[in-house]
Amino acid sequence: MQNLFDLSGKVAIVTGASRGLGQYFGRALAKAGADLVITSRTIASLTEFKQEIEALGRKALPVQMDVLSQDDIENMVKAAIKEYGKIDILVNNAGLNIRNPSLKFSWEDWDTVLNTNLKGNYFCAQAVAKEMIKRNYGRIINMGSCTCVFGMEGIAPYTASRGGVLLITRSLAVEWGQYGITVNVLAPGWFKTAQNAALYEKKEWCDYITDRIPLHRVGQPHDLDGTVIFLASDASEYITGQIILVDGGFTTGATKAIP
């Protein structure tokens, strides 16, 4: 039987690959056989990761890209096509968060978060889809979070952006399904990254979060491997416009009965 999860011969773009979840996804795709295009706002930050991917026997093309620049996005796609001749997979991972009480968020902070996480996500997908449509094939994986489906204090712009990502994903799935392109959301729960490391320094917060996760632990890098490979592979060819929450059950709600 054909290995539906084999990505050999596939080309995958992973945005925001200089650290954190972007590198988790890149490693998983490379181990499944894909060659990569890896992006960051600073290309020097990709040097070590490029070497790591090449040590796995795969190719990795580093490209400088700021998702707030349409020129950067278009140049990234051109570089990918020049190097590999095609794009099979996009992991739309680049994003950021700013934490503040809602009464203190500035106009500029709102624009920074929404433009990066929502506008940047959309225009990366648009630019890549133009190439995928030529071949009637593509897998687009937009990055979400638990805040795609619920609110949280102190990060109102971020929750707005992630909720928007989910609905953009569903719209694009409807439009691009006729071209053999699937568009889905991968939504991690609590994984320690540079973006949220400060939270993990607070024992009370760690205890609270762990208590609310039915599997009673935060996510580890390998917990995302299976889902990103699944969504990038032919195993998921009849799944589009969906969200998969990889959160240890966090979004089920309270895990203990009220005394």
Image (cartoon, helix red, strand yellow):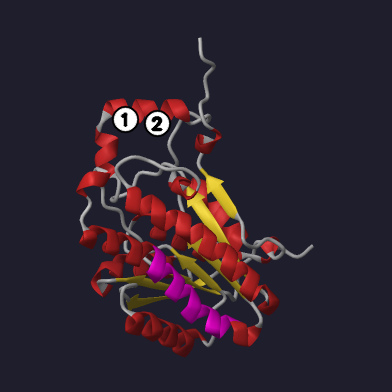
How far separated are the C-alphas under marks 1 and 2?
Answer: 6 Å
Task: Give the magenta part as a residue range.
Answer: 118-132
Question: Residue 114: x, y in percent?
Answer: 34, 62
The residue under label 2 is 209
| Residue 152: x %, y % from top left | 38, 41
Principal secondary structure, stretch drawn in magenta: helix
**Residue type at numbered disc 1:** Trp
Q: Which of 100 and 191 is in front in this view?
A: 100
Residue under label 1: 205
Placement of 211 over or under 129, stated as above or below? above
Residue at 31% over, 60% down = 113
Residue 197's image quarter? top left
Does the magenta-highlighted stretch encompass residue 127?
yes
Residue 159 is left or right of residue 255, and the answer is: left
Q: Do the residues labelled 1 and 2 touch (CB within 8 Å)?
A: yes
- Taking the spot 31% from the left edge, 57% from the top edge, the residue there is 96
Residue 203 showing in the rendered view: yes
Counting from the top left corner in percent of width and height, residue 5 is at 65, 61
Return the residue nearer the eye: 150 or 88: 150
94 displayed left or right of 176: left
